Amino acid sequence: MAAWLVLFALLAPRPLLAQPLTASPDAGRPDGDGAPATTPEAELEAFRRMVYDDGFVSGEDDPIGTGAQDEALQSIPLPAPEELIEDRIPAQEGAVLTAVAGVRETAHRLRIELRDGLTLGRDELEFSSRARLDAEVRYRLTVPEGAALVSLEVCDARGCRQGLPSPTAGNLSAYDDAARARSAGTSPLPIGHAVAIHDQGGAALLVRAAPVRPDAPPLVVRVGWAVRAEVRGGFMRTAFPARPADDRVARLALTVNAVDVVTPTLDGVPAEREETLPAAASFVVRAATPLTAERRASGVSFACGDATCVRFRAVTPRPNLRPGDVVVALDASPSTVASARGRIAPTALALRGMLPDGSRVRVVAFGARAEEVTAGWTAPTALPTDALALAPDRDLGPATRFEAVWRLVSGWIHRGAHLVVIGDGGWTEGASATAALAQARRAGVVVHVLDVADRGSTRSLKQAFEGTPDALLEVGPQAESAAAGRGDEALVERLTSMLAPAAVFRVEMRAGRTRVSLGPLPLGDDRVWEGPSSPTMRMSLDGTSARAEPAERLLGMALSALAVPHALAALAPEDLARTGAGVCGAHGPYPTGSAVAGAAHALALAHGRRCEAAESNPPAVAAEPAPSGVPAQVLLASLRRRVIPPARACFRADRR
């Protein structure tokens, strides 16, 4: 019984981080003094004495079943500090921030700049720590759909590193080598890595940086990005999705600066000063083109990978709609898809609200036949809301016949008036529909089709409107926002663009004798063309042409990132250039000059770097290994050091 009590005492948990990292096979030769040992070195010495005195060693009747004089037992290496830190200090994974406990985001500032049909963002993140060790952070930065990573900078009290194009965008790269290695220097600069991702939460930038030092000035990470923002109806807008809820992230301090547009707003409120928003808030930034501006075309050249590209852009001033006559035809056919049925009336109400004073409106509903909803011409403000809401539910037969609409309205409508069809992007095909559309065009009526469904318009309908001044607009997302009560600004912008008069009748791209038509350009819209550069390339607006000039630095960086997306790493250039960066393994040290953890300090990683060699014939169902709370090397060393010697002593005593 006494022997087993001794065994239990020896197996009691001990802090592994306090043990030496290695044990030399030459340390502590047996001296026969028999004094009790309280240090790991003394335990190792006692263990060796027991090995040499053990009569069972290498014998066939060894009750343990293994020889204790093998090389593995005589030199007992403990695991590298990377494994101890990764396994013993797990990171707390949040929806936004992942790092060990004690690390949090203490400030988040976002500066937005609106210019040249782009929205440029610069996020500045600050991270502080109360943890015991230096730590790495992993941050999911939510950005608008289509955003591209432009720049990266990581700073602390020692200085800053600028992000350079990284050849690898995955989880194992030169950055990972630097995060796991040990630094020989005394003042290493911080490191970082960023890449654009798209996951279940939408578009985001995945940012990793280190080290966040305890009780020290914060680690500052600056991330630049860009997204295209088209101009429609005289406005450019960018929607910012909400960040997931995470109690370790800071509130957002936001500023908006407009360069070639005016009156920027944040959720409809003028953005005149810094605004503080909740961490999980979504918002929309919007700005207008000037009313007094002239139509203009511009072109810039920029690097796109190893080549040179050009971007031409034509933009017109904000429209001031004139009063006119509008006939609205609402699709009431049974074939209207479910998503479109509830959006038809809200779209008609948005159109009613944006028409200028002095306009006249008539509303019809149609299916296999058409009938008037209102009695004669009326002012937009006099249209009854209830009648518009109930019109799509009328029983007008199982078809969607445009010819029925034209037979009803052809006696009312005149040259220059607008006929707006609101439906699910399709109508019954046939010679009668084609002939009715041709008659409307010959009569000088401008026909528009608004597709409010989630699916795209039918191919035949797209072909009928291709290359004509008439408009076919797919506005499903904007109509859904209006129907759900989230605002109709985006829908009104598209409708304004539809009804605005043409400011440029012919927009063309020219390169030598080659000409590509981009169609007419109404007031309040822009047209953008991007492609490979050519010395003779230019954009023509009704015969007036513009050539490309080299883009200024910030604009060129943004366009390059949008054309050729890339990851960025804030590391020493020689580390990014060397071969073999990003090894498939778990432990260091690694040959890198960008390491941030000193020899005497471990770095608490935000996530493990593990990968397995690919199997030539992987099994159909691969079972995931159960996670272990104790590293394998630690467990093996403890067994050899603390279990085998007392176990042998027990067997010896029993034998005697």
Image: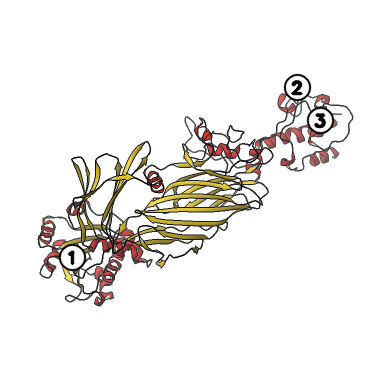
Callout 1 crowding tier (Cα within 10 Å): few <14, some 14–19, many ≥20: many
Q: For the residue labelled by badge 2, is the local secondary structure a helix, a strand or a loop?
A: loop
In this view of the protein, which residue sits in the foreground, 260 or 572? Answer: 260
Res 592 seen here: yes
Q: Which mark is residue 60?
A: 2
Q: Residue beneath label 3, please?
A: 45
The answer to whether 260 is drawn above or below residue 25 in the figure is: below
Q: What amino acid is labelled 3 in the image? A: Glu
Sequence-first disc among 2 and 3 = 3
Q: Looking at the image, is mark 3 or mark 1 nearer the viewer?
A: 1
Q: Which mark is residue 418?
A: 1
The answer to whether 420 is drawn above or below residue 18 in the figure is: below
The outermost residue toward the top is 59
Q: What amino acid is labelled 1 in the image? A: His
* Label 1 – label 2 distance at C-alpha: 101 Å
636 sits left or right of 272 in the view? right
Callout 2 crowding tier (Cα within 10 Å): few <14, some 14–19, many ≥20: few
Q: Position of residue 176 (x, y in %)?
A: 55, 39
Q: Position of residue 248 (x, y in %)?
A: 57, 56
